[in-house]
Amino acid sequence: MIKLFRFVLSLLVFASIAKSPQAADRPNVVWLISEDNSHHYLKMFDPHGAETPRIAELAAHGLIYDHAFSNAPVCSVARTTLITGCYAPRIGTQFHRKHVTVPMPSGLKMFPEYMRKVGYYTANNAKKDYNAIEGEGVWNASSRKATWRNRKPGQPFFYVQSFTATHESSLHFPKKVMENQKTTTDPATVFVAPYHPDTKTFRYTNARYRDNIQRVDQQIGAVVDKLEEDGLLEETFVFYFGDHGGVLPRGKGYAYESGLHVPLVVRVPEKWKHLVDAELGSRQTGFVSFIDFGPTTLHLAGIDVPEQVDGKPFLGKGVTASEVNKRNTAFGYADRFDEKYDLVRTWRKGRFEYIRNYQPFNFDGLQNNYRYRMLAYQEWRELYEAGKLNAAQSHFFETRPVEELYDIEADPHEVKNLAGDPAYAATLKELRGELSAFISQLPDLSFIPESVLAEKVFDAPAEFGQRHQQSIANLVATADLSLLPFDEAKPKIEEALNSKNPGQRYWGLIVCSCFEDEAKDLATQAATLAENDPQRLVRIRAAEFLGLIGAADPQPVFIKALKETNSGIEAGLILNSLTLLQDGKPGYKFEITKDLFQNEVLKNDTVKRRLEYLKQ
């Protein structure tokens, strides 16, 4: 009798677990991610894109999102945004490739860990590339062999698979490949963006990339077929999206639509279609971005979304299509990509994209070794140097304005900057103000140099930002002096240059460089800072300004700073400015040898990349 009682009790317990929301009655969720492609390359989003019939099948039983954005245009930053649900510049994960893996904000976990806690099996196949410390509870399995098929019978799952056929490296082919390997897509039929030269190289690269898109389409279809074979398709939400834009020149790594605007399709399963307040097969116009993908997945699973994240669900119980389609803003960020530094922020609102270039003298085409492995990049620069490009095609290699404004509906490839057009003055003012207020409140840690962040901030970056929100906002205000007429900005720039705060002096000098020759009256003060400031990076920014306007040879200041520093990250910042002064106008010849550097500095990846180029 006791054995029978125990047997019956065990059956009751098992039945209770099976019916509990901890283990059952939750949808499966699958993310299928193609690397390095913006929405421009799929015909369902752009008439010039490739046909993707398997992704179109997902869309026929799901939703197409016309305004989906990666918040960052490069892998590690974008994927960290996805897995954390947080804006990277707020939590210190904005640099690619990472020099420091930072901790998550206090009390916050990467979102799959919350799914595991309620009984989900989580599997990742296989790319991570996180800039934050993962923790031990995120994935049940993460490898090229990871699959949902290893879960317990009936266990709900979250599965991620990345597809590399479209990765940038697929276009790193030599000339002999272009000459001898034909593409399925006819190069004569492809669309060439107006900012690209229309050459054989660009047409072949476009065609080869569209072939890659079609390969990924079939690979995605194969995963969907497995779900159907396992009888799981109608119990599973299937997300397809690109991990950021790309990958032809001016895509991946650059904060234009071509780098940020991604394809997104969500297939809705029959069993769970009551969680979706939209007609299947319809197009959704609301703005969603990578900060929202994790919260959406949690919400579909019936899991509370942590308060510390920046995103919010766009699907699930209580989320209405009308509310989602009213969302019309997206924030984008571009910082360091490998050895190339920049500081660009974007604010997409409705039909307009506002781009704020905080260091506009760091032109887009500044050397990045990995980018220039591509024949199309190489040819583009050669044609520019030969004077064979028009204004739109030359923009990539020239100093940018501090702000750009594009009407995406009228100008989807962003070649007509409306920032100086009086007809758009009100729109410019509105978006400028919204972006400046947003990054000040965030706060945006990139207004502190990366080497300082690594030394003083990266042990708890999100918490540091909250404690120092006002001081960071003050740096943003100084940076925004470049938006004023120079005569109006000059007294405040002088105040910044005289400040006891090195951050203020640092940004005051960057603003001088933004004005270039207009700020030549400040050259004497800058020269004093270049020679005497106690902070190396302040001296470098002063020498950079003097070099840009041709007021002084920057080499002595740079050589001294490189000899002194024991920080590879700081040396990387210095070498970025050095490369700019060498390759840009007016152009300087620097004598750089390894014996300038301390041994520890030479181990830094950014330094290695710059020296590889500078010693050519």
Image: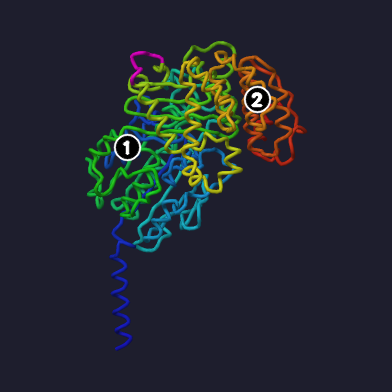
> Picture coordinates of residue 127 (x, y %)?
50, 46
Q: Residues within 10 Å of mark 2 (few under 14, many from 20)?
A: many
Quarter-wise, where is residue 68 in the image?
top left
From the image, tell me which residue sits under label 1. 56
Q: Is residue 43 magenta?
A: no
Q: Is residue 422 magenta?
A: yes
The quarter of the picture where the N terminus appears is: bottom left
Instruction: State the mark number for residue 529.
Output: 2
Residue 179 appears in view: no
Tell me which label, 2 or 1, sits earlier in the chain.
1
Report the side of 552 relative to 254 (left or right).
Answer: right
Give the colour scheme of this rendering: rainbow
Instruction: State the mark number for residue 461.
Output: none
The stretch in magenta equals 420-426
Circle 1: element type: helix
Q: Vertically, is 506 above or below 135?
A: above
Which residue type carries mark 1? Ala
> Picture coordinates of residue 195 (x, y %)?
46, 18
Report the side of 523 relative to 409 (left or right).
Answer: right
Mark 2 and mark 1: Cα distance apart in space: 59 Å
